[in-house]
Amino acid sequence: MASSKKLISREEWEKRLNNVKIRKEDMNKLVMNFLVTEGYVEAAEKFRMESGTHHIDLATITDRMAVKKAVQCGNVEDAIEKINDLNPEILDTNPQLFFQLQQQRLIELIRNGKVEEALEFAQEELAPRGEENQSFLEELERTISLLVFEDTSNCPVGELLDISQRLKTATEVNAAVLTSQSHEKV
C-alpha cells in the first residue's frame, strides 16, 4: 500500500501555521524544558518566576552541567567520577555510554601525545569490551588508528580529535543524566 503525500504551497503552510493555537502554559513548559535541558540555570529561574511555571531543582541542573562541562573540556575521568557521584547506576546500566566515555578518554590521551599510556589504557580497559561487543571493537580500532598518523589533520578518522567529538559525547552524557534525574523523581 503506497502512501500518498499531499503537497501544499508555502502560503497554505503559513496559513495553517498561523491558525495553530498554542496555549501559553504549553509554550511556557516548552521554554522551561529547553532551559533546564540545556543547563541555563539563571535563565530558568528567572523564567520560572516570570511565567509561574512549576518549581525546578536547580541543584540537579548545576550537577548535570558540571558533568557536561568536564566532558567538553576533555576531563573524562572527572566526568565519570561526577556521574558516579550523582548516580552510579547511570554507567552500570548503560554500557554504550560508558564505552563512549572510555573512548573519549583514549582520544584525550592520544590528543595529548601520551601514546604509551593510550595503548595501555586501550588494552586494559577497552579491548575487553570490544571482545564483548563488535561495534565497540570497531570503534576501538578506529580510535587506535589515530596513532598510525603523524599528521592527524589528514587522517581518515581525524574527526575523532575534533571538538565536535567531545560535544557529541557530552550531549549523550547530558541526556543520560537527565533521564536518570527524571526517573528519580517518579
Image: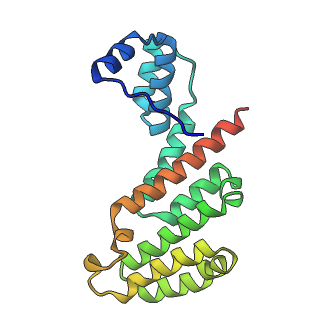
Against 166, residue 186 (above or below) is above
How did the renderer colour the structure? rainbow
Against 186, residue 181 (above or below) is below
Q: Nearest the camera: 143 or 19?
A: 19
Q: Nearest the camera: 93 or 26?
A: 26
Against 129, residue 177 (above or below) is above
Q: Position of residue 42 (x, y in %)?
A: 41, 29
Query: How many tags in the picture?
Result: 0
Q: Position of residue 87 (x, y in %)?
A: 67, 50
Q: Is residue 4 left or right of residue 92?
A: left
- Quadrant housing residue 19: top left
Q: Is residue 173 left or right of residue 17?
A: right
Q: Residue at x 59, y 47 (%)?
A: 177
| Quadrant placement of the N terminus | top right
Q: Residue at x 31, y 79 (%)?
A: 155
Q: Position of residue 139 (x, y in %)?
A: 52, 74
Q: Residue at x 59, y 67 (%)?
A: 99
Q: Given the current orientation, which residue lies at the most extreme front position?
A: 1
Q: Nearest the camera: 29 or 47?
A: 29
Q: Nearest the camera: 170 or 8?
A: 8
- Quadrant housing residue 166: bottom left
Q: Residue at x 55, y 39 (%)?
A: 2
Q: Is residue 175 left or right of residue 156?
A: right
- Quadrant housing residue 17: top left
Q: Position of residue 129 (x, y in %)?
A: 65, 76
Q: Is residue 177 left or right of residue 42?
A: right
| Quadrant placement of the C terminus | top right
